[in-house]
Image (cartoon, helix red, strand yellow):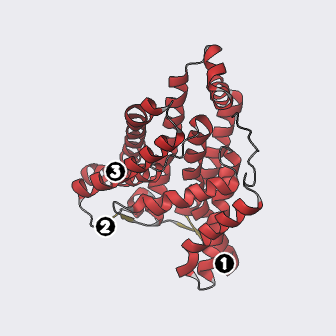
Amino acid sequence: MLFLSQLINGLQLGSIYALVALGYSMVYGIIMLLNFAHGDIIMMGGYFALVTYAASSNPLLAVVATIVGCVVLAVAIEKVAYKPLRQAPRISLLITAIGISLFLQNAAQLIWTANSRAFPSTSIIPSITFKVGGLSISLSVLVTIAVSVASMVALTFLVQKTKMGKAMRAVSEDTEAAQLMGININSTITFTFVIGSFLAGIGSVLYCCRYPVVNPTLGSLLGLKAFVAAVLGGIGSIPGAVVGGFAIGLAEVLFTSIGLSAWTDAMVFAVLIIMLLIKPTGFMGRSMTEKV
């Protein structure tokens, strides 16, 4: 029974990593950008939810405000910081993403101070527990896992079956050829950021419900672990991001359960190094060739 309980905890944590990793994978798949500001958009989402709930006491409004706030913020960053550098070397985009990450952290400190704030997790998702045999499963766990799986299914359908999804795949394969075929590159890239930040908003609420504290550095380690999950599953792959997220979440809970909680962060990055040595493309990634 203890094993099942830990398994469910691992799936809940992995689901959050998977949601964040999906945002990484989508943006990287389109413009080959490692958007290290993604975790800090999630941090800002936590503050959006906190402020909205404090003002309205309406959990649904807080969730909607978080998603809308994350989408608007991410699109603004893409237009102001990333779009002018699309033709620049990739290192320029990477440095810009790191700069945006630091900017958001410092902006949060200026606005809300560096002190941690309690997040009203039980007000967003009621603390209801279901008994299945001798196992107790909270509503928060069920919602988190269900949202993660539903997001993967919806994204897979979007990318494979819709017109916008075909445009995204075309831009991912060859931007210049896609433009010659009449695809609006700017709209496609902006739409990708919208989807990624939409998932970031949801992930922000779910993460803060599991760890009910918000502070300006909340997204740093979360973003790095989600990036590891994306690489582990095969960055650019939607199912791979989910598989990688679940793998990292389960591994963390396993290490914690055997008394090695102080080593969980180190374990995550050790797994990344081992994976890069054994299979650099990840579980479900594909090899890519570059023209020189």
Q: What residue is drawn where x is 73% and y is 48%?
A: 285
Question: How many residues crowd around disc 1 within 10 Å: few (fewer than 14), some, or many (20 or more)?
Answer: few
Q: Is residue 33 above or below residue 291?
A: below
Marks 1 and 3, how far apart at CA:
44 Å
**Residue under pointer 3:** 104
Amino acid at the residue labelled 3: Leu
Sequence-first tag of 3 and 2? 3
Of residues 88 and 167, the one nearer the viewer is 88
Front: mark 1 or 2: 2
Left or right: where does residue 157 sit relative to residue 56? right
Residue that label 2 marks: 116
Residue 212 image position (x, y, % from top left)? 40, 66
Q: Which sits earlier in the primary sequence, circle 1 or circle 3?
A: 3
Q: How far apart are marks 1 and 2 (CA)?
A: 36 Å
Q: In which quarter of the image is the N terminus?
A: bottom right
Residue type at the position of mark 1? Gly
Q: Can residue 34 be seen in this view?
A: yes
Q: Where is residue 179 in the image (x, y as percent from the top left)?
A: 60, 18
Tag shown at residue 134: 1
Residue at 77% x, 62% y is: 278
